[in-house]
Image: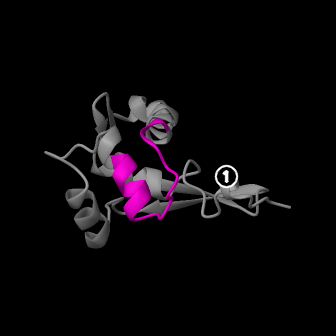
Amino acid sequence: MSKQTYKVCFCFRRRFRMAASEAPADIKALFEEYSENGIMGVDQLSRFLVEVQKEENATVDDAQAIMNNLHELKHLNIFHRRGLNLEAFFKYLFGDVNPPLNPKLGVTFL
């Protein structure tokens, strides 16, 4: 059984046990569209940020910064030097590295 941990109200964490931590079919389809041979590289991640997440000003350097932030996942065997596999991409989408409100757009948290 895997465990998923989420921050709640910036105060505490809530942990859920899940029978299987598998990406849904629509996430898999998105990953297949923006990856090559099961690995999403920096260029593909940059294209994903612009086309899907509508971050028009996202650059390859921004995608590289995301990859560098996800480097801590290396010990979980889901990060590859060449890029992200499906599990790492799924964790990126729902992780702290990908906030729902982008601070670069002037959105601040109270």
Instruction: Indicate the quadrant where residue 11 lies.
Output: bottom right
Look at the image and say whether residue 65 sits in the magenta stretch.
no
Furthest residue toward bottom: 26
* Label 1 SS: helix
Residue at 50%, 56% in the rendered image? 4
Instruction: Give the quadrant of the N terminus.
Output: bottom left
Instruction: Give the quadrant of the C terminus.
Output: bottom right
Residue at 69%, 54% in the rendered image? 103
Q: Amino acid at mark 1?
A: Lys
Residue 34 left/right relative to 90:
left
| Location of residue 9 in the rendering, given as x and y in whole percent from the top left corner | 76, 63
Q: Is residue 16 above or below residue 61?
A: below
Along the line of sight, which residue is nearer the eye, 108 or 79? 108
| Location of residue 78 in the rendering, given as x and y in whole percent from the top left corner | 33, 39
Q: Is residue 7 above or below residue 83?
A: below
The magenta segment: 45-61
Along the line of sight, which residue is nearer the eye, 61 or 77? 61
